[in-house]
Amino acid sequence: MSTSPGTQSRVPASSRGLPEGCERAAIIDPAAIRHNVETIASYVRPAKVMVAVKADGYGHGAVTTARAAVEAGADWIGVAHVTEAIALRDAGIEAPVLAWLHTAQTDFAEAIERSVDVGISGWELDEVAAAASSLQTPANVHLKIDTGLGRNGCTVADWPQLVARAAEHQDRGLISVVGIFTHLAVADEPDRRETDEQLEVYREALQVAEEAGLSVSLRHVANTPAAFSRPDAHFDMVRVGVGVYGQSPFADRTAEELGLRPAMELRTTVANVKRVPAGQGISYGLTHRVDRPTALALIPLGYGDGVPRIAVHAPVQIAGRVYQSAGRVAMDQFVVDLEDPDTPVQVGDDVVLFGGDSGISAADWGRAAQTINYEIITRIGGRVPRLVVDSAELAAGHGSTSDAVSAPGAEEGRA
């Protein structure tokens, strides 16, 4: 089987390893996504669940994630950009979709035509109303209040003017204000008082909107950490991202402790094995030298594939045993110290960077790279094919193939 870089393909659910001819892959498990959506929903009921599939589904494939989420009962899909929403519509995703991050080039008319709800932080409101007027079709909008994060969202000072203007457009039949939302800054640190302060500002914003004549059906604030730790932030709907992909948003609680299952496994095979003497330097800058005779394994993934260059002593499973990376990660490869000049490791042996049954998590790589698990899973590049292997099918003994789902910007093809 050959798989082009940057594509997402569905492969027979007969093996968790790589298909023949595939040199590296991020293996995506829709069953894990479904499980995570159901788990999060159980925490937040009766609130609805919006699943964020922005950034190509946090690197897992937006269409694959959206389909699995909807199958698991997700009520809404969330994206950053209207272009991401349109790609979902083109793939046949019919669930309600909200897009909230816009530029001067955003095509609001297409969003309205394709039944995509639009997040409004301020300047977009009149442009969305104008697009709705030209189409003679009202736009569904969600007004965003900046309660303290300092990114997009209307300031508290400008909020009364925004809701008054929105009420005018709604009275003219140009828009329908269906939601009011905000985003939390420190919900992953549950003891921080700033979350309480943000919620208080949000409640006051709701009151101002109500006094302006707006009555909304969707109040949404909570992200993944707040979904688990702040029931007072659930309101009518939660917007969850990283938890859907089986990653914990907390520094002190693992995904397993939250009942989540990682949905990505990053795999390749050993590209080279060689014995080296004590004192051998490794990779650019010679920042690492071995202190004894040993053998080194070459792993054919690098920062060109999204493996962080800054990672130091990152865990890697080779042929079922965990080793550590040595020296700097290069563009296409990095080195692992096999700790034994007479190692049994050979060219072609299986390599798992994280996920699956390896016992290594994206959070482990995050710590090695001084970053977070969100970044590790999202940054895996287009040169690494995404292979969809549904573990539920695997358990049932099914092994059918289906159409490939292309990565953003690529043409749909078949595997």
Image (tube, rainbow, N blue to C red):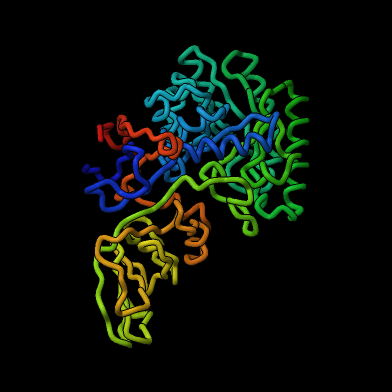
| Residue 145 visible within the image | no
Q: Quadrant of residue 282?
A: bottom left
Left or right: 98, with 413 as reference point: right
So how many labels did they put on this image?
A: 0
Q: Does 302 sit above or below residue 388? A: below
Q: Position of residue 254 (x, y in %)?
A: 60, 55
Q: Does 65 sit above or below residue 296? A: above
Q: Image quadrant for the N terminus?
A: top left
Q: Image quadrant for the C terminus?
A: top left
Left or right: 253, with 345 as reference point: right
Q: Nearer the viewer, residue 192 or 358?
A: 358
Q: Nearer the viewer, residue 3 or 127?
A: 3
Q: Position of residue 202 (x, y in %)?
A: 73, 38
Q: Quadrant of residue 396?
A: top left
Q: Does 91 sit above or below residue 153? A: above
Q: Image point 40% across, 59% down: which residue?
A: 353
Q: Image point 77% across, 47% down: which residue?
A: 196
Left or right: 304, with 210 as reference point: left
Residue located farthest toward the front when viewing the structure as drawn: 397
| Residue 357 visible within the image | yes
Q: Quadrant of residue 232?
A: top right
Q: Nearer the viewer, residue 269 or 376?
A: 269
Q: Image point 73% across, 48% down: which residue?
A: 195
